[in-house]
Image (cartoon, helix red, strand yellow):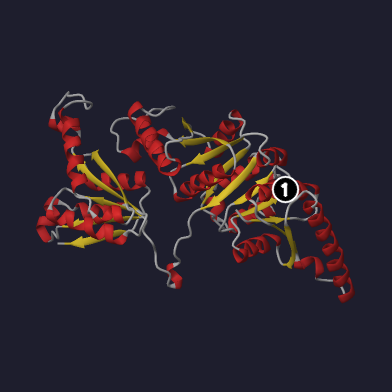
Amino acid sequence: MKIVCGTDFSIHAASAADAAAAMAIRCKTPLELVHGLEPATLEFLSKEGVDEVYARLRRKLGTEANRLRAGGTEVTEKMILGRPQEVLVNEASTSGADLIVVSSIGRIAPSRWLVGSVAEKTAQLSRVPTLVVRDHDRLIAWARGKRKLTVFVGYDFSPSSDAALQWVAALKEIGVCRTVIAYVSWPPKETWRFGIGGHSGLTENEPEVRAMLERDLKERCTEVFGLGLPELRIVSSWGPVEEKLVELANAESADLIVLGTNQRHGLSRFWLGSVSRTMLHRTTTNLVCVPAPEEADLSRGQLPSYRRVLVPTDFSKQANRAIAYAYGVVPRGGEICLVHIVPPANVFQSGTPANGGPQEKRKQKLKTQLQALIPKAAEKRGIKTRIEVAEHQHPDLAICQAAERFSANLICLGSRGRSGLKKKLLGSTTEGVMRRSPHPVLIIPN
């Protein structure tokens, strides 16, 4: 893990540098100590004044680097003209760093939220994780092997949260960690997302919904951590997610909070909200912001990569054709979800319990049929496949809900090509999916 650490020579920056140095020693890698010189500070100075500022700051940077070297850390130092957050982000990108470490004095007054701190701006811009140090002693003790680090992850099934899990898995390779994964749910949203009929619980998820959440969270964590599953927490809340996460992290005595960030910029941060940004202001615990995998910029001609593709099928020839195309679109190491929609249980057998009844047996048989549709070449390419049979009266809505559960970035489905009066009389699942889904939809014609 190559580390870039920013410093402004304050006492808080020195504490962050101590933590970064201890981690660098643990990882047996050099530490790059960087000071970004704000151009505005030189704007009205004479040439002699500018030279004096440069000389003074270089001495400070050298003194700080030597202090860290005295502790056994290999340090390189750089002073770069530019806004501190931009300097850190650019230097991390240029040097191939895996982590940026910055300091924070803790809570920030609401009057400064519109401007933000260097720590916040760095986390918003960086394409590598940003560690904001609040309690350096815990990090240093962990890096030196003197204590276990309690890592708390706020998870929400998004690509940035998946990236956060991957980062924590890498952290566990460095030192001993106790890991807690928390998912904060809003019952009405979960009821819709899973396509469960009836009313949702007011304060808690219905047992069926909770069971599905536990299943999906365990499945996602198993993919990342293997058999050594972390501790899982699934809680319901009607309030702001970030407030609940702070409460849970405090209850777990977390040493480090890890969050994925979608890195919203400008006014969208305030209109759409940002859990990671708010957590930066609300917590006094060490915090890591992990960015989502970079998406292709279509406006610049970059090509998108679809790593999670949902393929609905009713086992017809037209629908099954889409399966081969989906596996062809997904790159090596991607994931496919094959889903089949059946009418609710009471359509088949009124009053029959779902568990162990005819409907459940039918669903198991359908899952076996879906399994048989997986191309043999998928395993050789490292493509994982998820199988799902969902109950719903409206297939198009059920497909969109399945895409949300799977966090799909593409839906691939076959079309029977109905047109005219037949389309008006029978409807079109394909058309319904295209109208409802926020995700790209690839249509394979018959």
The front one of 445 and 25 is: 25
Q: Quadrant of the C terminus?
A: bottom left
Residue extending farthest left: 422
Residue 10 in the image: above or below residue 184: below
Q: Residue at x 75, y 55 (%)?
A: 7
Relative to 7, does residue 179 appear above or below in the rendering? above
Tell whether 61 sits left or right of 259.
right
Q: Position of residue 304 (x, y in %)?
A: 39, 64
In this view, the residue in front, 373 or 343, is 373
Res. 121 in view: yes
**Quarter location, residue 127:** bottom right
Q: Is residue 28 left or right of residue 357?
A: right
Q: Residue at x 39, y 29 (%)?
A: 205
Q: Nearer the viewer, residue 422 or 310?
A: 310
| Left or right of 135 on screen, residue 291 | left
Task: Name the residue carrying label 1.
Answer: 16
Secondary structure under badge 1? helix
Q: Where in the figure is residue 426, as x and y percent of width and height?
A: 13, 51
Query: What x and y, as percent, mark residue 109?
Result: 71, 44
At x 58%, y 30%, the residue is: 252
